Image (cartoon, coloured by chain):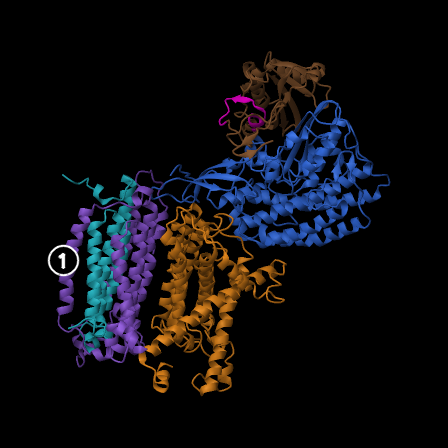
Amino acid sequence: MRGPAFVELLEAAVPGGVVGTNLEAIDPWVEVVPAAVADVCRWLHDSSETGFDSLQCITAVDWFESDPKKAAKAGWDPHLELVYHLWSTRARVSLVLKTKLPRWKDDQPGQPPEVASVAGIWRSADWHEREVYDLSGVRFVGHPDLRRILCPEDWEGFPLRKDYEMPLEYHGIRGR
Amino acid sequence: MSQVIDDDPRIIEFDVRTDEMLVNMGPQHPSTHGVLRLVLRTDGEVVSEVEPHIGYLHRCAEKIGENISARQFIPYTDRMDYLAGMNMNLGWSLAVEKLMRLQVTEKARHLRVLIAELGRIASHLVGMGAYGLDLGTFSPFLYAFREREKILNLFEEACGARLTYSYITVGGLTADLPPGWLGRCEAFLNEFEPIIREYHALLTTNAIFVKRTGGIGVLSPEMAINYGCSGPVLRGSGVDQDMRRDGEPIYTAMYDGYAFEVAVMKDGTYPRDRAYPAVPADAVLGDCWHRFFVRMLEVVQSMELIRQAIDRYSACTGSLGEPVKIAEKIPAGDVYLETECPKGQMGFYLIGNGTPKPWRVRARSSSFSNLSVLPELCHGCLIADVPAIVGSLDIVMGEIDR
Amino acid sequence: MSSSVASLLPVLAAAEGGLNWQGFLFLLFAVLACSLAVAVVVADNVVRMSFYLVLSLGSTAGLFFLAGAEFVGAMQLMIYVGGTLVLLVFGVMLTAQEPFVAIKTPVRDKLLAGLVGGALLAVLLQAAVSGPAWSGSTAEGGNAVASSSGQPSATPLGMALLGVRVDGDVASGEQSPADGQVRSGYLLPFEIVSVHLLVVLVGAAYLARSKRRKSSGGQGGGASTGGMR
Amino acid sequence: MAEYLIQTMGLPGWLTWSLLAVLSAVLILNLMAGGALVFIWAERKVSARIQDRLGPTRTGGRFGWLQSLADGIKLLAKEDLMPERADKMLFRVAPYVSFCASFAAFIGLPFAFDMVALRLNVGVFYVVAVLGLEVFGVILAGYASASKWSLFGAMREAAQVVSYEVPLGMCIVVPVMLAGTMDLVTIAEKQSGWFTNWYLFHDPFTFVVFWVYTTCAVASVNRAPFDLAEAESELVAGFHTEYSGLRWSFFYMAEYSSMFLVSGLAAILFLGGWNGPVPIASLLGLSEGSGESTGAFVRLLGLANFLGKATLGVLFMMWIRWTLPRLRIDQVMTTCLKYCTPIAAVMFAGAMTWLWVFPGGC
Amino acid sequence: MNLLFDPVGVSHYLVVGAILFTTGLVCMVVKRNALGVLMGIELVLNGANVNFVAFGSPVLRGEQASILGLDGQLIALFVILLAAAEAAVALAITLNFYNNYSTVDVDRADDLKG
């Protein structure tokens, strides 16, 4: 079930959802559009052929280069990438799902981009999405309780963004 | 009187209208294993809701990882699960090696197995001892630490550190074993083997222990998988999964040729049911007792693996190989690798971009997912069960908060 | 030296043979019992009230010991102080929320109650003091406990509860046990009290049950563990 | 002794009585404080040996026997903290209530023949009744601390102690019934002679009753595995969470004194009191009444016997504490109501029947 | 007679009993908290008990005590037992009241008022 056949199956299940694949990478991955994340995940979880019953990890990667010279050579536009690592306990195979989000919603800095939550599909997504929201600033729509998890609740900014700057002062504690 | 759980005989029916109370368990509390804070909503002794608050030990490990080279990140992995630093070193090293398509020598491979399994024993000993502490018995804790000290002595001889080893590293290990080490290791194993029976007498088969853990915090296999639980927590629920056998090739290749049975209940029995205590009648698959027992069996399993590794390692003639340079460039691309750490599956995700520094480092912590199931397990339990359940998950806050 | 102490305490100095230790203990316990009883009335906080009440009842138990009623004293400690008040404190805890811990009484009511109480007290004291000489031979009062410690005091009580009066012949001297109409045992009251206690336990457990919940029946319940005593 | 003082020294009666009262009080107080120090030291050493450790080794010589004194001095010097929202008066008073209850119970406990502060007709009843008052201090402490953990501990203690008094009382009634008196001195005297005269070996029922008594006694003084009121892994420190320094040490002393008290009670009720397993004194032809010095010797022997037995009981409790995990509150109540109480009741009936079938003993 | 200068006798006990009784009565009247009323009842019963014990005490009354014999102590015992029972029932009623009204203020228990 690995390889192109699986991608075809996925494309058939969620038409227009898959926008790119890389099957030659060390960890082959499938890229889906943000709007289809929930549908794809639901299918991956429920479908008996795949049965990815466990979500191991959600990672947000901030593709952003603050140095304009390097940014010109980077070969990508600034964006935010969500990486889902799925695992099937029955078939004992893993799957990497990626989706690209804008860095800020409507290009307004400070406004986290939005994507559908998968906490209803895998309960493990609950805390992982909270962590991604906390550290990288992605708003998961439909999450039951989207709060900061590691940082204090009144913390400002998203520390794992590449352009994040430590606050000068937090409740009287020097930051920098 | 928030909810009535009819079928649970432990819940005393309330005759008096009482008021709910919010109680803070932690971050300074004797049995929350560090700085975990649990907000309990209780009605008398009955807990209706538990909300974990984490982050008190957040040290920005992932952000730091983006600013140092891959090999420099090794000491930071030590400080995640500080009770099993060796296994964390191994997980990160393998992930970087996977990205660099590096293969360590045969001798380094067996030494890694040897060290990692010793680390597993050391971690499970803490888990076991601290669990006794959670249930109010102090002595097993010291018995466990007495044996752990011996392992730490061995580690100290091998790498000079007792807690944060940075021994296993990208491309191999920082040093070979000192002369005579293998003999001492074997001597330790021989000493340790009969002591396990003491642990079983003090805890596993102790009537009060069974009463306190049997049937408490039952985690169904479906729920365990859904919550992303792993390690003994997952296997305690009867899910047959062990990354050492089911993981990615680069990790399973390490255990190639080793004989071991995954410690999980199959058809109502554990692989070692004959030699070790039978499952008591009070215990239900997926409860605290099973999680604890799986850990105890894994200790035995690890001892066997260590014995095999000692044989293989001493049979190796080649060199240990050299670790990569501190500022070795890592290729572009992204890899994710999960290894079977004592607490569960520890995943490292790393993105390289051709410079020595990774573009992104992500640590998928097993305790993080294991802890997230806590509110589910503590539904309607008694206050005294909360430490029992938290202890059976065997969490380490350093790994959860990173 | 003795005279200086004695002059400070005229009550005790008056007793024959210098300071009477029993008198001293009586005074101590009596003052404690009364002042703490007053404290119960004065206190606003329910828990404090119950604390004062415990001490007051404990001091009364001390008075019982002094009067030679050791069994009653121990019983007072056990049941009253140990049992009833723990029950009471349970009640306080179960019902004590911030606004209810202290429910204030209007000063007017307090004054009125004080007046009425004072009048009653005056009448009672008058009756207590001006009554006939209650005591038979005051000379023996001095070393009371010492004299009574020879024979067990609990045995006659126990026998009486079983319907046998061992003190009958002591009381009526030459009266033969045959015309025991004067003194009968306490078997019937004892049984009545036993059954009463049982009924009360069941009743209390029943009353305290919450009736709003659909009951699955069978289980006894939490409050009855407190009432089980 | 009082007569002796009055007649030979010519002291006035009131002075004699006060002197004697103060003397007994001081003796008991010292026994409590000193006993607590010794037992705390013993607890540290015993637990250390059980756990493959050494325990205190430096303070006061090789065996660290001054350790608890050093701890006491540290506690004296500690800052005395009181939560802001605490009920200040009750918070201050609570430790003394516990301590006084423990102290008052000692008044009725005989240590050897005639070595009792106040010989009461209802000694056993009195001791148990007063010991039960200790719980009141704990409840007050839990309430007054204004801490939820303390309140939990107090409520647990109240429920537990009040419940365990029932089987405890039933167990105590059995030797009382055998002796036909509630006077502790008489009960102990009736068990003189060889150890087979002890009520423990009187009949099979009393043997069982002794173990039920042991269970209930451990529970009623809040020792592991029944130490739910202070369950450190659940309730931080239970009812004394907010206490520090001297006040805390009063709770501690009360705990160790009541341990000694219930052990002493067990020794008197079941283990022959001050009568040793072998009647050395009577084999030698000595008795309490024979002469000034031999009488004193016999009494001292009895004292040693009694203290030895009570200390063994305390050590037994320590052994249990460092071996077993803690029970849960519902299991504690189950143990009491479903096991101890019925067993005690049946054994009581059994002992009664035995007495009826074998009136003269077997 | 002079209470202060007599050795302790029945009258002394009667005085204590009177004071306890009166305070208990005042407590019952004054307290609006149902538990306070309960405590007042306990005090009243206790004051009565003091009298019973005093009249039946061989220590205080010498040979006169045999007129009452053990009756004083026995009645005191029954009073203690019944007080315990009474406390249990009263507490149950209070708890029941609290369950329904969320207060223990006796002035609020006026549902039967016409």
Query: Which region shows up in magenta?
Result: A131-145
x then y, percent, for residue E43 = 24, 58
Q: Is residue D141 above or below residue B116?
A: below
Residue in view at x 17 percent, y 81 percent? C174
The tint chain E carries is cyan
- Between residues D87 and B395, which one lies in front from this camera angle? D87
**Is residue B250 found inside the magenta-colored segment of the image?**
no
Chain rendered blue: B
Q: Colour of chain D?
A: orange
Q: Position of residue C49 (x, y in %)?
A: 29, 53
Q: Chain A rendered in what hue?
A: brown
Q: Position of residue D268 (x, y in %)?
A: 44, 71
Q: Is residue A133 magenta?
A: yes
Q: Which residue is mark 1?
A: C119
Three-letter amino acid code of the residue under disc 1: Ala
Q: Above or below — where is D138 with respect to E49?
A: above
**Percent of width and height locating residue C21:** 30, 74
Chain hosting mark 1: C
SS class, disc 1: helix
> Left of B149 or right of it: where is D156?
left
The purple-tinted chain is C
